[in-house]
Image: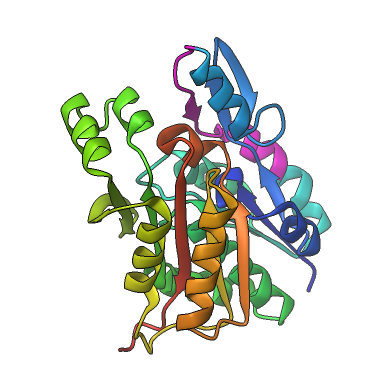
Amino acid sequence: MTYKITSDSTCDLSPEQIEQYQIGIMPLCVNLGGKSLRDGVDIHPDDIYAHVAAGGDLASTSAINMAEYLRMFTELSPKYDFVIHVCISSDFSSCFQNASLAAAELDNVYVIDSRNLSTGHGLVVLEAERMAREGMEPKAIVAALNELTPRVDASFILSQLDYMKKGGRCSTVAALGANLLRLRPGIEVTDGKMHVGKKYRGSFEACTRAYVADRIGGRNDLELHRVFITHSGVPDSVIQAAVETVKALQPFEEIDVTRAGCTVSSHCGPGTIGVLFIHTGRF
């Protein structure tokens, strides 16, 4: 059977992965400086950082509307036996609702709620592609992906809270206290929602090593094919620290380093890094 896997731009897969697996990407809208721009097409994270550093407001993002999804699905539907589109968590955006309404018009288009963001979302996209490539029927893929999404482990550690403060997600006092004490909060995605996890203290590189060790150290329930290290712009030494720690703790076949797109970057700002993987659900 012929197939096409598509995704919202929030999956944060690398350009190489998008090309290798022929993933169709639907860009979210990024609102910045009075303009509506397409994520990863008209605007990139460094553009947001430069705008904010120059005194501009933070960027905001908007969901892909139903008409845009319907336009893409209508174009792809006649060309393939089936199309599977994977959305950012429905708790973060109305993308899933809009895509589902559009797909209802077509009998060979299926929409998946990744219950995640960034490469937590990306892991679901790549699993959809693998299942389709291996010949699974579309309804079986949908069922398998819905079983998979709770087993995606996605989290990040932030080096600073400046963007969180600007966006009203933490108080000035909390941000000042965290910066003075060199506290680096962890952010975890659970059941499609984000919450604050463990807080780390010290240099960002040392905190990154401790964070990665906490997420994957001593575990025997990991699917060891692939792990993502995804960041919003951090020093190379921090990326290397994360990679070295992963290699020392678990024998993953692939360690994929990717740069987060505008959605994550506009909320967290520069200096955010995460380790994202799939676990088996059996300890």
| Residue at image point 34% right, 85% down | 218
Left or right: residue 225 versus residue 187 is right
| Residue at image point 68% right, 46% down | 25
Colouring scheme, one of rainbow, by chain, secondary structure, one colour: rainbow
How many numbered marks are there?
0
Q: Is residue 182 above or below residue 274?
A: above
Left or right: residue 200 versus residue 280 is left
Q: Nearer the viewer, residue 178 or 71?
A: 178
Q: Give the magenta part as a residue range.
A: 55-72
Pinpoint residue 170: horizontal percent, then vertical percent.
23, 32
Tell me, yes or no, whether the highlighted magenta stretch contains residue 274: no
Left or right: residue 201 versus residue 269 is left
Image quarter hosting the N terminus: bottom right
Residue 216 seen in the current view: yes
Based on the displayed image, in which of its 4 quarters is residue 213 positioned? bottom left
Q: Is residue 217 above or below residue 39?
A: below
| Residue at image point 49% right, 81% down | 248
Image quarter hosting the C terminus: bottom left
Q: Residue furthest right?
A: 79
| Residue at image point 41% right, 38% down | 268
Q: Nearer the viewer, residue 257 or 237?
A: 237
Pinpoint residue 256: horizontal percent, then vertical percent.
62, 66
Pinpoint residue 16: horizontal percent, then vertical percent.
77, 58
Residue 12 seen in the current view: no
Q: Is residue 157 above or below residue 17?
A: above
Pinpoint residue 276: horizontal percent, then vertical percent.
47, 65
Based on the displayed image, in which of its 4 quarters is residue 175 positioned? top left
Q: Is residue 50 above or below residue 113?
A: above
Q: Nearer the viewer, residue 248 or 228?
A: 248
